[in-house]
Image (cartoon, rainbow, N blue to C red):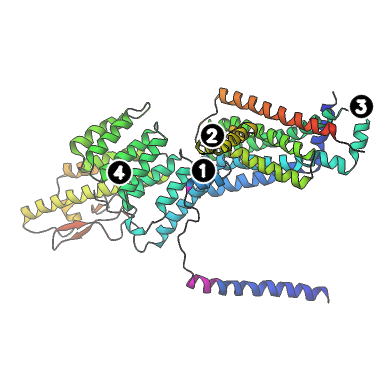
Amino acid sequence: MKVVPIALNTFRESVRDRVLYNLILFVLMLVGASLVLGELSLSQETKIIVDMGLSAMSIFGVLIAIFIGIGLVYKEIDKRTIYSLLAKPIERYEFILGKYFGLCFTLLVNTLLMALAVSLALLVKSGPGAMQWRIMPAAYLIFLELMVVTALALLFSSFSSPALSALLSFFLFIIGRFSADLKLFAETVGSGALRVLCQTLYYALPNLANFNYIRETANGQVASGRMIGAATLCAALYITVLLSATVLIFQRRNFK
Amino acid sequence: MKTWLWTALLIISLGAGIPLQRWMDGQRSSAAVIEDSLYIASGRTLRRLSLGYDGLMADLYWLRTIQYFGGKMEQVKGRININDVSSWRLDLLEPLLTITTELDPNYIAAYRFGAIFLPDLNPEAGIRFVQRGIENNPQEWRLYGDLGYICWKQKRFQEASEAYGKGAQIAGAPAWLKTMQAVMRLKGGDRETARELFQRMYDESEDAYTRQLSLTRLKSLQAEDEIALLGRLLNAYRERHGSCPASLAALVKALAPSLLQQMQQGGMQFDDTLAPLDPDGFPYAYNPAECTVALNEKTTIVRWRF
């Protein structure tokens, strides 16, 4: 299986590119928020630390997933290293999967360290309590969302330029977050054709709202096991569709 | 050009910038008019614009609400009476709290803050706001308690009783809600009920601000009780001696030791000369000509009347 060495190499490349430096900014922001917001928030510092920590985890992660994801394939083509890679006994699908899982591993490390930093901030601010562990299911759901966004970015990067890939990935991220509105619009719109279009889009595009449990977590709720299971299955389906499409496109590309 | 010249130029320019900026700040602050404004007044619109980070956006609006309230507090001239904020021109308080709770319908702290201060501005708006909180959080018994409090403050005892009753039915609600349901129906308007309510708010509240406010009101009620007691003692003294005592200390010294002990056990404080002190440790003001007692001008106790 050549996927694992490619994935590890992609991870090493991300570390060399100082992707994980965002963690320093994240920790500084959390420390700042913990110190300042305690004075300003009228006893809501725990909620605000959770909201801010998990939202920053998601925002930083999405930025990494998109901006690194769009370069995964393009960089190899641009630097012409793809020729030496594909000249070896490596299948094209292995290359795509290796790149994908490599970035996912980077995001896993990033998300895990950020979740630990939020837990630590909560521990310092409020002492030992359930909230430090309650953020973990939400952090896992964020990681699932990042895996889907990475697959999206990889799909676009397999056939278009980095700028266009970034733009398209952002658009789909925004639409994914607005999925509930798309469904509502489909239910309320008068035109039949428009209703069918909205419903098609609702089911065809990744519904990223499925992975957003930040507000509820900050209010002390915990995502149920059933909900986490459904979200995991949902992410697996989205990722399978996106990666399959990416492999299909990439296999048809001519590098001559 | 030489290096030292560039260095000197840099330092001089930096140095000159400070007084210039101070002068400009001075000009601006004297002329600037700070307007209260909300660029986007709809929480639902903001929720869409937040791209799913609605919890974080709600926190930002919560912080803005607190800063707005604090800013208005700073603008108040003279002694701050937190028990009645109707004169503070808090025009944006309701929209800010509404946006916060539309962004995060489970933001209990925002509903509770609104329950305390919105009734001073517009009782109906306060009741509507808390009712919306109950709709979004039907299992939150504290909101029923807050609704009961607002209705009680408006002397709508029947509605207050109903609110406490509904809150009492929620699993995990404390037993005092049931008590308050009956108390409201029987004797909603007396001072004992007020004391009971504020004591509950003080004991049950998680945030320091509500606890502080409840404590302030408890102290106000205690001061009211002590002033009433001293008034009765002064009347009795005058009837017995035909004149008012020279001071409150003289009044207390003339009391039977058992009565003095009772007063001390009831929480009343005295200084070394036996002059009675209010709950914040300031001596009560006494007018020997009229034989009346009142709060000292310097006291930190805020009068609160139901």
Q: Residue at x 55, y 50 (%)?
A: A36
x and y, in percent, of residue A109 in the image: 71, 34
Front one among B242 and A151: A151
* Residue B218 picture location, percent across and down: 29, 45
User: Circle 2 marks a residue in which chain?
Assistant: A
State yes or no: discs 2 and 4 in contact (Cβ < 8 Å).
no
User: Can you identify the residue that label 4 sits on?
Assistant: B150
Q: Chain of mark 3?
A: A
> Depth-wise, is mark 1 or mark 4 nearer the camera?
4
User: Residue at the spot x=32%, y=56% of the render?
Assistant: B86
Q: Nearer the viewer, mark 1 or mark 2?
A: 2
The residue shown at (85%, 35%) is A253
Write the start and end of the magenta stretch as one range. B25-42
Question: From mark 3 to mark 2, how far is it between C-alphas?
Answer: 47 Å
A154, B68: nearer the viewer: A154
Disc sitting over residue A89 in the figure: 3
* Disc 3 with disc 1 on a shared chain: yes
Q: Secondary structure at mark 3?
A: loop
